[in-house]
Image (cartoon, rainbow, N blue to C red):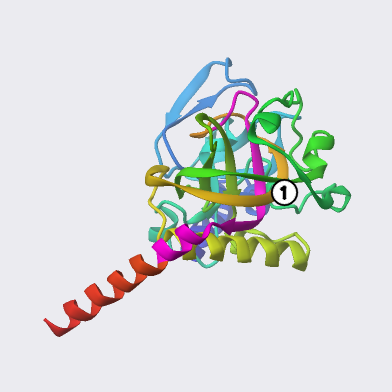
Amino acid sequence: MKRRVFMIFLAACLGMVPTNVLAQRILITTARVNLHAGPRRSSRVRHVLPRHTQLAWNGALVNGGDMVEVVRTHAPRDTGWTAAEYLVEPRLGASPQAESNHGAGCGVLRWPVKTMSDADAATVNRTPQGATISFLRAFRAPRVRPQNRRANSVEKTEFGVSGNVIMWGLEADSDLHLVLADASNSSQTIVLEVPDPSCVTGATTAVRDSIAKARHDVLQALGSPPSGVTALNDPVPVTVTGVGFFDFGHSTGHPPNAFELHPVLSIRFGARALARAKVAKRFSLISHLRGGIE
């Protein structure tokens, strides 16, 4: 990371990169993405950017949308618009090798809202409102979803809901992504997202601590996350609380309105899930010790 920043600085000194790039944030593409000539997905495609392309971004998005204006750090004439959902911001101190790995960066699209670091975070009602999965799936998705503000009253509400976790995994933005299904109908799902605390920089200490504990509880119960969202062998009953959030509908398990609890602020696993986790850890320890003896 330090080496890349130095190279950009050197290029700016030589006139190869606009000096305002130095004040911009460095992003990495997590997949092949289109670089568009304009701020709409229907705009003409100028280039297809390969995975791990380094971009500079000034922090602005299309108002209420998901497109960002960027410039390629190694080709400063290549400017355009791309979808923010396929971008991450490398964590400070991460090595260039680590930044290329799944889960090595922090999110970009509506990230302040996703981590309760936005301008409206203080207006969120922290008294959980009981809900069912079908109730949460029935909300009308807002047309405009601002980058640093809450879209509507749903995003200012903390909900509590129970169901079965049927899939989970680590995403490129370092979130733990869980698919929560209705216990009586596994096709009815919503998404739960648990950020990495190191990517939560603007929230209150209480919120950050809640996120950290929820992530610890998930990892303790389910173990090491797979890279990418993967089905569990058996459904895992949980009760969770988290803040209502409307994404743009690109992830596994999203309902039609793209509703999520993001961030998850607490999660309670059933006794069977915790017992199963204990047994798995015991076998893992025994296998490790046997491997050391051999």
Residue 268 in the magenta stretch? The answer is yes
Residue furthest right as drawn? 123
| Residue visible at 52% across and 45% down in the picture | 178
In the figure, residue 183 lies in which quadrant? top right
Nearest the eye: 206 or 29: 206
Q: Position of residue 63 (x, y in %)?
A: 76, 29
**Residue positioned 68% across, 53% down in the render:** 23
Residue displayed at 69% across by 51% down: 241
Percent across and percent down for residue 4 are 48, 58
Is residue 176 visible in the rendered image? The answer is: no
Instruction: Say which residue label 1 marks.
Output: 112
Asked whether, in this view, residue 283 is left or right of residue 263, the answer is: left
User: Going by the image, does 84 lie left or right of 292?
Assistant: right
As rendered, which of 292 and 272 lies closer to the eye?
272
Side (left or right) of 27 relative to 154: left
Classify mark 1: helix, strand or loop.
Answer: helix
Alpha-carbon neighbours of circle 1 within 10 Å: few (<14), some, or many (≥20)?
Answer: many
Reply above or below: 129 against 69: below
Residue 196, picture quadrant:
bottom right
- Between 201 and 294, the one lying in front of the other is 294
Most extreme residue toward the bottom is 293
Is residue 87 shown above or below 274?
Answer: above
Residue in the picture at 65% in, 60% down: 211
- Residue with the most extreme left position: 294
Instruction: Based on the picture, tell me whether residue 181 belongs to the magenta stretch.
Output: no
Question: Is 269 located above or below residue 29 in the figure?
Answer: below
Where in the figure is residue 149, as x and y percent of width and height? Answer: 81, 41
User: What quarter of the picture does the C terminus occupy?
Assistant: bottom left
Give the amino acid at mark 1. Answer: Pro
| Residue 257 seen from this side | yes
- What residue range appears in magenta? 254-277
